[in-house]
Image: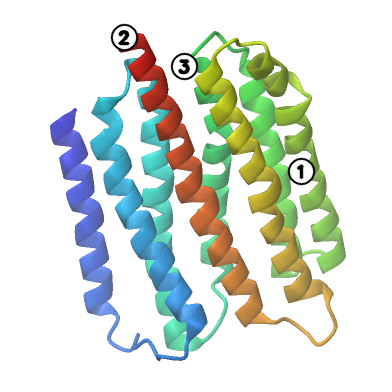
Amino acid sequence: MSKLIKIALAAVAIIGITSSANAETAILATNDFVGISFWLVSMGCLAATAFFFLERSSVAPQWRVSITVAGIVTGIAFIHYLYMRDIWIGTGESPTVYRYIDWLITVPLLMLEFYFVLAAVKKVPSTVFWKLLIGSLVMLIGGYAGEAGYVSAMVGFIVGMAGWIYILFEIFSGEAGTIASKSGNKSLITAFSAMRIIVTVGWAVYPLGYMFGYLTSGGVNVDSLNILYNAADFLNKIAFGLIIWACAMQNTSSRSK
């Protein structure tokens, strides 16, 4: 398994080097703060991917799926950010399609982390898995339909918000939240609570970005939109995984004593 992880990390690094080498016109200006934010997030995701895969063997076996998924999320985000930053720097256009392709893969995986974290401690019904998956897809499909112009921006915003509210209900008061509160595992409860805060506060950046970009007067403000989205991705993908890693390390240490 360690050999496979090393191969995966090498592949990610090669993709990054190749993409950078091919970006002949992607010259980052000193005052291009949106472009700088794309670079910061891409490098942060690369570092996080290496960290999660290298730390995978340090946690108890039941936590390794969660740590692996965290590394997959940041790895996928890194690859997409390579394309998004080059599109922005080269054309000045918002890479909406690439961003939503990334979200359609990584956001459901982040939501399923709630399921995997619970499953590391106790048996969890499969209904939790499907509720979180469906909620995240409704949120993303609604947002994309609004941003891409398939429906009005307001309709897309309402559908996306409905999916987000459903997710919040599930992790706070629904089946997932109830299982976590009754688990009796201190490290799990701490991690679950921190993850819920990120989904509540950190994810609030996305509808704010959508509002500034599409629902305010004066047209789409692509600078504000992309900076907000990039900042949210940095927090929600990297910090989310670090919380899970910290919980796994704490639980592993308590078991070894």
Which residue position is annotated with label 1?
163
Q: Quadrant of the C terminus?
A: top left
Choose top left, top right, bottom left or bottom right for residue 181. top right
Q: Of callouts 3 and 2, which one flags the residue occurring earlier in the amino acid sequence?
A: 3
Disc 1 from disc 3: Cα separation? 26 Å
- Taking the image as shown, residue 65 lies to the left or right of residue 181, namely left
User: Circle 2: is it few (<14), some (14-19), or many (20+) Cα within 10 Å?
Assistant: few
Q: Residues within 10 Å of mark 1 (few under 14, many from 20)?
A: many
Q: Amino acid at mark 2?
A: Lys
Residue 75 versus residue 29: which sits nearer the camera? 29
Left of 159 or right of it: where is 98?
left
Secondary-structure class at tag 1: helix
- Report the colour scheme: rainbow
Mark 2 lies on residue: 257
Residue at horizontal 38%, vertical 32%? 67
Q: Which amino acid, by three-letter code, is at mark 3?
A: Ala
Q: How far across and down, in percent of the image, does residue 234 sit?
A: 49, 58
Residue 67 vertical placement versus 93 (above, below): above
Camera-near label (1 vs 3) is 3
Check disc 3 and report the residue beneath it.
120
Three-letter amino acid code of the residue under disc 1: Gly
Disc 2, SS:
loop
In the image, which is nearer the foreground, mark 2 or mark 1?
A: 2
- The reply to whether residue 152 is in sight is no
Question: Judging from the image, what secondary structure is the residue with disc 3 in?
Answer: loop
Label located before the other in sequence (1 or 3): 3
